Amino acid sequence: GENVEQHPSTLSVQEGDSAVIKCTYSDSASNYFPWYKQELGKGPQLIIDIRSNVGEKKDQRIAVTLNKTAKHFSLHITETQPEDSAVYFCAAESGTASKLTFGTGTRLQVTL
Amino acid sequence: DGGITQSPKYLFRKEGQNVTLSCEQNLNHDAMYWYRQDPGQGLRLIYYSQIVNDFQKGDIAEGYSVSREKKESFPLTVTSAQKNPTAFYLCASTFRSRLNEQFFGPGTRLTVL
């Protein structure tokens, strides 16, 4: 089955700096790669996703890049703000049932 | 309001008792999922269902059971056979076709005393 690895597990940046979180996956048939943000005590919320037919997608301060050959994808957050502090999860969809395999999460802390 | 609701938010259970967690959605989604979240381990799939009256085991189904009698509802029962049930449980749903966003509920935190 699919295996997703995520790094780093914790990340601390100063407000205004950029943050990058990286994930690798094992199943070359995976075609959909969402990123979720989870605040304390809440369910994850989708912040951006990318499909295998594109290499990069941007939404304001957030971008995701995908390298299918190397089987890795990354989340980039620019001009970080304190409200970006949360746990971020990457995931990869495998199989035919929209099953998502999640990474282990990155706790991002944006300091003033 | 459209969305996914989970109840209760907090649940306490004595060892040896079965407990059922509720998940309801009014998004007309076909597929529903249950995940377990433990610190440092991300989300792990327990069970999923793509259509009514059908469901499949995920990666960690042992000690859990589900039913899907209605499109809107996908309750999860944590049985006494689950060795370490204390965790945060998340329900999600999506349309059946692939490459669609999974929407998550707010979660239920289960604590076994």
Image: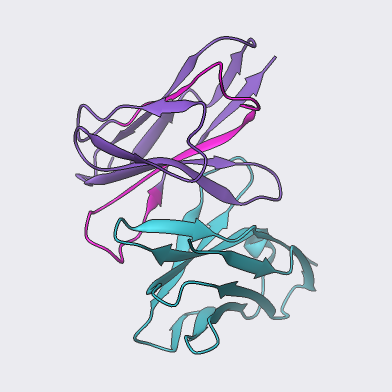
Chain colours: A cyan, B purple
Q: Where is residue A10 in the image (x, y as percent from the top left)?
A: 77, 63
Q: Position of residue B77 (x, y in %)?
A: 44, 22
Q: Is residue B57 shown left or right of residue B36?
A: left
Q: Give the range drawn in magenta.
A: B74-103
Q: State yes or no: residue B26 in magenta.
A: no
Q: Is the magenta stretch mostly helix, strand or loop?
A: loop
Q: Where is residue A87 in the image (x, y as percent from the top left)?
A: 64, 57
Q: Within the image, what quadrant is residue B95 found in?
A: bottom left
Does residue B106 appear anywhere in the picture? no
Question: Up-down: is B106 above or below B99?
Answer: above
Task: Work out which quarter of the rendered image holds the C terminus of chain A and state it.
Answer: bottom right
Q: Is residue B91 shown left or right of residue B29?
A: right
Q: Position of residue B31 (x, y in %)?
A: 27, 46
| Residue at image coords 19%, 44% | B28
| Residue at image coords 61%, 16% | B12
Does residue B110 appear anywhere in the picture? yes
Question: Up-down: is A36 above or below A13?
Answer: above
| Residue at image coords 39%, 56% | A99
Question: Up-down: is B15 above or below A64?
Answer: above
Q: Is residue A24 shown left or right of residue A34?
A: right
Q: State yes or no: residue B78 in magenta.
A: yes
Q: Is residue B77 shown left or right of residue A18?
A: left
**Total numbered labels placed on residues in the image:** 0
